[in-house]
Amino acid sequence: MAVARNLFDLRPVRVFGSETRDGRTVVLVPKFRGRGLGWLRALLAVPSFRVKLDDEGTSVWEHCDGRSTVLEIADRLHGRLGGDPAEVRDRVARFVKRLLANGLLTLDHSGEEP
């Protein structure tokens, strides 16, 4: 996966569904994603892995809708939490990269300059 020149200009998009439990997001990741084994999900009592996010992760996840840039998401989180803006941006960037690496997010490259 190629990383964009500036992650902060890109718009993250959730790949999987989620639910809210006790005010926090739980991402539902299917256990079998491939076409060949996807039918096995219907046979499982629990067809998805459950990735539980903390408060900050929940806030970031909620804004990964393809409309907000990573920078806008970080600025919203900073507005909610306060602190050093550069530190909040760094934490959000690391979290988004981790979600990308694990296939939970994708990036919308529309509007990115070549």
Image (cartoon, rainbow, N blue to C red):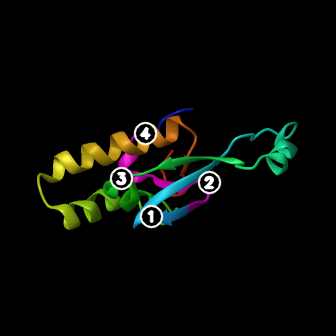
Q: Please, what is the three-letter code of the amino acid marked with disc 2?
A: Phe
Tell me the residue at 20%/66% (across/down).
Answer: 79
For the N terminus, the quadrant is top right
Q: Is residue 1 above or below residue 68?
A: above
**Mark toward the viewer: 2 or 3:** 3
Q: Quadrant of residue 103?
A: top right
Residue picked out by circle 2: 16
Please tell me whether residue 9 belongs to the stretch shown in magenta: yes
Tell me the residue at 18%/45% (across/down).
Answer: 87
Q: Residue furthest front?
A: 45
Instruction: Report, in whole angstroms, how far the alpha carbon at label 4 lies from the one at label 1.
Output: 16 Å
**Mark toward the viewer: 4 or 1:** 1
Residue picked out by circle 3: 54
Of the image marks 2 and 4, the number of the one nearer the N terminus: 2
Q: Residue furthest left?
A: 83
Q: Does dot 4 land on a helix, a strand or a loop?
A: helix
Q: Are marks 1 and 3 in contact (CB under 8 Å)?
A: no
Of the image marks 2 and 3, the number of the one nearer the N terminus: 2
Of the image marks 1 and 3, the number of the one nearer the N terminus: 3
Q: Which residues are magenta?
A: 5-18
Q: Is residue 33 left or right of residue 55?
A: right
Q: Does dot 3 land on a helix, a strand or a loop?
A: loop
Front residue of this view, candidates 58 and 77: 58
Q: Is residue 106 above or below residue 80?
A: above
Residue picked out by circle 1: 62
Tell me the residue at 88%/36% (across/down).
Answer: 36
Q: Please, what is the three-letter code of the amino acid marked with disc 3?
A: Asp
Residue picked out by circle 4: 97
**Mark toward the viewer: 4 or 3:** 3
